[in-house]
Image (cartoon, helix red, strand yellow):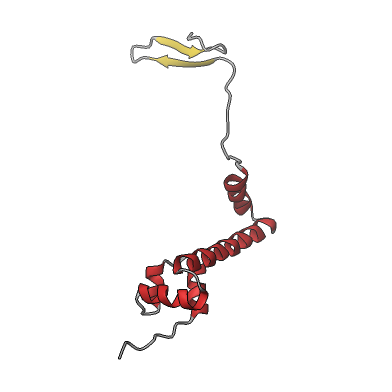
Amino acid sequence: MGRPVINLDWEKIGFAASIMCTAEEIAYIFKADADTLWRQCKKKYKCTFKEFLRTRQAKGRMSLRRAQFKIALQGNPRMLQWLGINHLGQTNKVEQKLTGDLSLRVISPDGTETVMGVNDDGRET
């Protein structure tokens, strides 16, 4: 006589996968051996548990992305910035160009004054 069959709630397993749980975490949550998940998945869905995870995790990523876009389109500036940087290649770098005489006046303890700097064409003055 073999071990009793563990009845797994595949809807809950699918939800766990959609929030990016790993196979090991799912096995732990459902008090089942990872091999049991693999065997029962093959029997029920005619695919490997890895394929099952991959499709459910993809659905989870789509849901997360949809929620992020919804928040951004409601005008959340931080989400708009994050999506712009990560999906549109935008940057938040600020480039500054200094022009004019960039000199520094240095007065030593004995009172002598020295002016050092760089002019517009990059030469030291």
**Lateral position of residue 83 relative to residue 116, left or right:** right
Image quadrant in which you'd find residue 91 = top right
- In depth, the one of 32 and 64 nearer the eye is 32
- Quadrant, the N terminus: bottom left
Taking the spot 63% from the left edge, 44% from the top edge, the residue there is 88
- The single residue placed furthest to the left in the displayed view is 1
**Lateral position of residue 75 relative to residue 57, left or right:** right
Determine whether 124 is above or below 6 in the image: above
- In depth, the one of 92 and 97 nearer the eye is 92
Image quadrant in which you'd find residue 73 = bottom right
Residue 72 visible to the viewer: yes
Instruction: Indicate the position of residue 22 as horizontal and vertical percent values.
Output: 42, 66
- The single residue placed furthest to the bottom in the displayed view is 1
Determine whether 115 is above or below 7 in the image: above
Instruction: Indicate the position of residue 40 as horizontal and vertical percent values.
Output: 44, 78
Taking the spot 45% from the left edge, 82% from the top edge, the residue there is 8
Taking the spot 50% from the left edge, 9% from the top edge, the residue there is 123
Instruction: Indicate the position of residue 24 as horizontal and vertical percent values.
Output: 37, 69
Image quadrant in which you'd find residue 100 = top right
Instruction: Indicate the position of residue 119 as horizontal and vertical percent values.
Output: 54, 12
Residue 19 visible to the viewer: no
Determine whether 109 is above or below 65 in the image: above
Taking the spot 58% from the left edge, 30% from the top edge, the residue there is 95
**Lateral position of residue 84 relative to residue 21, left or right:** right
Total labels: the figure holds: 0
